[in-house]
Image (cartoon, helix red, strand yellow):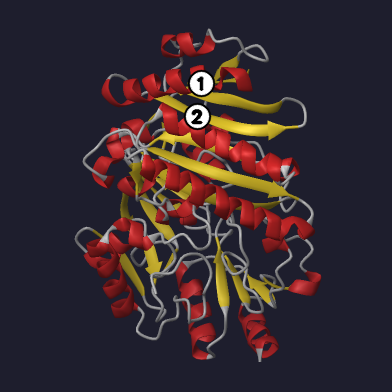
């Protein structure tokens, strides 16, 4: 039946329907997804075409998945296992409003494309740290950005999720609607962190703002300096919230063949100030290499195109309140697990940054830290070891955070691992409301774990 469905779609989307066995130009970030055997891939150019594709697939009860940037980690997230992959990559336009305060952005756009399109206007938006991340999954998951301290997360900067000619959402029944605070308000609420449970967003009407060149710098320290780096990072996170929202900082603890275990920082300042003073004390700590930094636009800093489909990846995440003790002991747990299992070739790294006050709808407290634990490898025989390491580290890290009374229940969906209960972490009331909205919009369960698009994290 799948071949017949693809044949039917090919008759309507000639030249934009590709069969897996002849789709050599297709690539995607994660090697596991690249290996996923879909039957065909179709490339719509508009919301109406997405609607038509859904009519065909739902009418035949045919499995599918939707790819925007494709920066996810498992089959069926962005590439359908045994079904049809709907690739939104051709829906990538950016149209700036006359007053230069908003922009309509195609739902298949990548962060780097949007930054590049806004750059000639001297504008920016709350976009991804990595240029190859798509606006779809990034924004529907919340959207943590280097500009979050000043503007909040991406979900705080979406005005509408499209209507008939702008900002569209294609619902599970293939109808096209606008979602805003005033129109389909329940859907608008649900799309603010609800992931891929409610429809296919083909356009976002987003806030844009003036943004000139900004500073980005990096520095790598030996493992023996980790305690000092954590101490200074915590001070900078507090300054970011209460004194200067131009500040951005993240640190990553990682193992490389060159340096062994080390801790590095990425320092950002949303003004054209070379080597901002706020980082002086941090940068006075003896480092493995000299300070690298410069002034550049967001368009330039996100323009790099890393090779796709080369590595297999897994993420896991934990949120907690600031605690140097947790930081030091947590990194010790990571070292013990990795070295005890001889898994340094999985390229483990733990990336940490602050959820700033601008995003504090999350809780009444300030300065929670979100952690991304990531592994990347190339040998499929290491898959089980990688999954086990990710699960065990987060479990032990969480246990430690709870024992120190600094655990925060929030699970950032875009960093979460399979098995992490994302929607429960939103609180009982939010979880219940998301479930009710999903049932109302999708009574047949097309976008559920028992439906047609089963990948990523499901409300039900």
Q: Pointers 2 and 1 in contact (CB under 8 A)?
A: yes
Left-right relation of 206 to 360: right
Residue 271's place in the image compared with 42, above or below, is above
* Residue 349 drawn at (x, y percent): 61, 38
Give whichever of 364, 272 is nearer the camera: 364
**Mark number displayed over residue 290:** none
Disc nearer the start of the sequence (2/1)? 1
Which residue corresponds to the image point at 44% horizontal and 20% vertical from the top-left? Answer: 231
Q: Is residue 337 above or below residue 431?
A: above
Mark 1 surroundings within 10 Å by alpha-carbon count, few (fewer than 14), some (14 through 19), many (20 or more): some
Q: Quadrant of residue 373?
A: top right
SS category of the residue bearing label 2 = helix
* Residue 432 falls in image quadrant: bottom left
- In the rendered image, residue 10, in percent from the top left (x then y), is placed at 66, 80
The quarter holding residue 413 reads bottom left
Residue 316 vs 200, above or below: the answer is above
Side of 277 where 163 appears, left or right: left
Residue 316 location (% of width, % of height)? 53, 51
Can the viewer see residue 123? yes
Q: Mark 1 points at which residue?
A: 227
Q: What residue is shown with label 2? A: 328
Which residue corresponds to the image point at 44% horizontal and 24% vertical from the top-left?
Answer: 212
Residue nearer the viewer, 207 or 373 = 373
Name the spot of residue 454 as percent of width and height, x first: 52, 74
Left or right? Give the position of 12 relative to 159.
right
From the image, which quarter does the N terminus lie in?
bottom right
Residue 122 in view, yes or no: no
From the viewer's perspective, tell me whether residue 332 is left or right of residue 25: left
Figure check: 11 above or below 324? below
- Report the residue at 48% width, 44% height from top: 397
Mark 2–mark 1 Cα distance, whole angstroms, equals 7 Å
């Amino acid at each position: 039946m799948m071949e017949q469905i693809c044949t039917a779609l090919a008759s309507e989307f000639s030249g934009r329907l590709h069969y897996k066995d002849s789709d050599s130009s297709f690539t995607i970030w994660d090697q596991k997804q690249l290996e996923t055997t879909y039957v065909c891939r179709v490339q719509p150019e508009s919301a109406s075409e997405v609607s038509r594709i859904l009519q065909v697939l739902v009418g035949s009860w045919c499995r599918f998945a939707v790819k925007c940037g494709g920066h996810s980690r498992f089959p069926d997230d962005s590439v359908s296992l045994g079904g049809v992959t709907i690739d939104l990559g051709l829906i990538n336009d950016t149209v700036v409003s006359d007053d230069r305060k908003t922009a309509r952005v195609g739902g298949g756009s990548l962060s780097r494309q949007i930054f590049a399109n806004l750059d000639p206007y001297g504008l920016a938006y709350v976009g991804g740290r990595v240029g190859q991340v798509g606006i779809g999954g990034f924004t529907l998951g919340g959207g943590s950005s280097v500009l979050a301290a000043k503007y909040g997360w991406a979900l705080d900067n979406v005005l509408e999720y499209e209507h008939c000619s702008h900002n569209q959402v294609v619902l599970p029944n293939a109808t096209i609607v606008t979602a805003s605070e005033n129109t389909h308000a329940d859907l608008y609420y649900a799309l603010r962190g609800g992931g891929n449970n409610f429809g296919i967003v083909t356009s976002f009407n987003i806030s844009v703002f003036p943004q000139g060149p900004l500073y980005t710098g990096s520095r790598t320290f030996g493992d023996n300096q980790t305690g000092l780096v954590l101490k200074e990072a915590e001070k900078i996170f507090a300054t970011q919230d209460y004194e200067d929202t131009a500040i951005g900082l993240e640190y990553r603890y990682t193992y490389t063949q060159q340096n062994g275990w080390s801790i590095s920082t990425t320092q950002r300042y949303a003004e054209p100030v070379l080597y901002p003073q706020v980082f002086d004390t941090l940068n006075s700590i003896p480092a493995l290499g000299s300070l690298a930094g410069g002034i550049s636009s967001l368009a330039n800093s996100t323009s790099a195109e890393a090779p796709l489909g080369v590595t297999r990846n897994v993420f896991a995440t934990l949120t907690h309140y600031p605690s140097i003790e947790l930081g030091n002991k947590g990194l010790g747990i990571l070292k013990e697990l990795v070295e005890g299992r001889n898994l340094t070739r999985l390229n483990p790294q733990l990336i940490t940054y602050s959820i700033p006050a601008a995003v504090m709808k999350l809780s009444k407290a300030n300065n929670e830290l979100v952690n991304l634990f990531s592994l990347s490898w190339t040998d499929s025989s290491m898959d089980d070891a990688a999954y086990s390491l990710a699960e065990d580290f987060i479990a032990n890290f969480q246990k430690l955070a709870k024992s120190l009374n600094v655990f925060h229940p929030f699970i950032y969906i875009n960093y979460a691992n399979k098995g992490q209960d994302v929607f429960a972490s939103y609180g009982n009331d939010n979880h219940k409301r998301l479930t009710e909205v999903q049932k109302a919009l999708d009574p047949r369960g097309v976008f559920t774990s028992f439906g047609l698009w089963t990948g990523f994290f499901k409300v039900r």
